[in-house]
Amino acid sequence: MLKNAIGKNWPVLTLGLVLLAGLVAPFADRSTTPGFYVEVLLGGLMAGVLYSLVALGFALIFKASGVFNFAQGAMVLFAALAVARLAEQMPLWAAIPLAMVIMVALAWLIERLVLRPLVNQEGVALLMATLGVSYFLDGFGQTVWGSDIYSIELGIAKEPVLILGNLFQGGILVNKEDFVAAIVAAALVAALALFFQKTATGRALRAVADDHQAAQSIGIPLNRIWVIVWSVAGFVALVAGVIWGSKLGVQFSVSQVALKALPVVILGGFTSVTGAIAGGLIIGVGEKMAEVFLGPVLVKAFDLAGGGIENWFAYVLALLFLLVRPEGLFGEKHIDRV
Amino acid sequence: MFYRENGQFKSTYASDQQMLPILQDRAFMLGLLAFAFVVVPFLASDYLFLSILIPFLILTLAAIGLNLLVGYCGQISIGHAAFMAVGAYAAYNLVLRVPQLNFLVVLVLAGLIAAAVGILFGIPSLRIKGLYLAVATLAAQFFSDWLFARVKWFTNYAHSGSVQTAPLEMLGWKIDSPAEKYVFLLAVLVVFTLIAKNLVRSHIGRAWMAMRDMDVAAEVIGIRPVYAKLTAFAVSSFYCGVAGALWGFVHLGAWEPLAFSLTQSLNLLFMIIIGGMGSLLGSYFGAAFIVVLPILLNQMPGILGVPISTAMISHLEFMIFGALIVFFLIVEPHGLARLWAIGKEKLRLWPFPH
């Protein structure tokens, strides 16, 4: 019985063991205190929530239109730039809705000018088109809004605070802003889940995601649905842009955040909102752990010129997962037929 | 009227299988080759060689490599500059550590090393398909970026992380003037194009195309996916490895890991999309387009007499580049090669289209 279960699931078990070993390994070094370990873990989780936020944008668009939107990163940058520059002219509570209006307009334009003429093309062509859109948005955003480094002030104190001082020796350092960001992201994810599950529009979106033609034949307007989906993705980009922007400053590198979110999407499964969230957390924790604990070991062992393994670690982690489950953690299982 | 195959009968297997079945095509190709080899070296200026022709030739080679994988075998890779990097650094280390090797041998060895790495990163393709694979290939990109920037052995412990190469010399021929570089690259490209052309019309190319069109069906008719996909990865990375070595040694001369970044990978993808997927000719068109376009865009304000700041120019460049890609995809999703084919078909019927 047991033998049977192992024989069938050995890849999953191996992967689980490897991950478990990775989680326990830091304690091999005596200097790792539980407090520090939890601190790293929490930091990873918070970064993970932010990754999920960007990954959500990918998952939403892919689910509803089958387009792999490479421009998500550019949209995050564009939204962040818009908010940062508008906030110079008006209070933040007015700048954010106005930026949202701009993002909706952008979604409408993309649907009209790019997606509609490309209906029925293969996935690669659409991927390339979004790459073109991403180049365009990068240039356009910086032409319109300027290309210096701007800041978004959310009015949250940036200094770290100590929590759980009585549980661990020395307490745990947590960045307050990270904490707020994580809560906002969690709230957004919950709101999106409700929107998808409970509203009529959400149902229509899911219907389109399941089958374009069937959805159209029962009277769901595809074009409008696409505008809505891209607007929602724009909204997600806006939130991600504001949070990342206040964290890192609004600059070109914000658009690179999308590259961090890509492994999250494939790990979680392209079509799954749950996957985007779970994947984000896994990648966030894995990356932080690798950066803090594995990096120095590698540098020492191979005499490297600095660590920086977090740039590829997420991808390798995602690859490992995919080798075990090719459709991602929560992706739909794909059955091939001739 | 003049471009017609009337009266050209195929009476032997050899003539049935030749690459250019129409006499006019053969004459045109020979003329073009003669022009490129003999006339261009005397006519072109150094600027033309260094900033247009040499990058064009090398990038065409890389684009052909990527096209073999993406266009013929249907496995999307967004990380192919990684294999160029592998080729470049392999060649650098070979020249550095085994100086007596002929550069041609170095090129082939660098290609083989890149092919081995390509097979390694191609293994996930056996399990992962489509866009999942596309994203997974980014792993190769980021890993190579990191590897060559951080592991000092590859750059021979250079402080800045950038490497420099000595001028090329082989069999007593010192390749240092732009015209000589051009002729050398052209010869390499012609040889590799011939090899690629013959690969894609042999059984292996057919296996790739079957894989691309429908992998399950291909498996049913007896094509082993392991063999087809991994050979595609190997050949494709071999081409890119050679192109990378040439890019480093002939075009750049000195480079840092940034020379083979994600931007380069995306550029390669743009080349085959704009040129035409699954078309060797398309790789040429695409590479020419991507090489010339930024130069044109850069000089546009000067020609039009509009004073614009350089930062603005680079932003506008991004915008126009992006817009053009979308435009091309909408107007002709099959790329410039399809436009060329349509033009040829029209010419065949001209001036009596019935």
Image (cartoon, grey):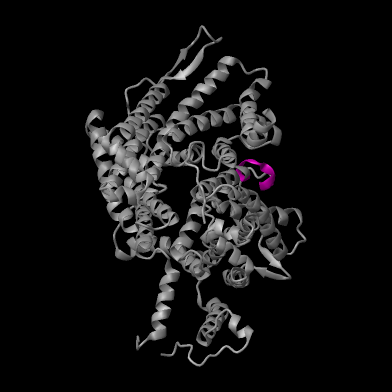
Residue A165, x across and y down, in percent: 50, 9
Q: Residue furthest top?
A: A166
The residue drawn where x is 46% and y is 26% is A46
Residue lying at the far bottom of the rendered structure: B7
Number of marks in picture:
0
The residue at the point 62 percent across, 26 percent down is A20
Closer-to-camera residue (B322/B337): B337
Q: Which residues are magenta?
A: B148-156
* B35 to A320, vertically: above or below: below
Residue A337 percent across, percent down from the top left: 51, 53
- Residue B207 versus residue B265 in the image, above or below: below
Q: Residue furthest front?
A: A1
Q: Nearer the viewer, residue B211 or B353?
A: B211
**Residue at horizontal 39 percent and vertical 32 percent from the top:** A244
Residue at image location 49% in from the left, 49% down from the top: B131
Image side of residue A195 versus residue B239, left or right: left
Question: How far from the left and from the top, in percent, is residue B266?
Answer: 48, 53
Q: Is residue A210 magenta?
A: no
Q: Quick check: A277 left or right of A301?
A: left
- The answer to which of B185 and B268 lies nearer the viewer is B268
Q: Nearer the viewer, residue B65 or A95?
A: B65
Residue B44, image x, y percentages: 50, 74
Q: Is residue B71 visible?
A: yes
Q: Main secondary structure of the magenta part?
A: helix
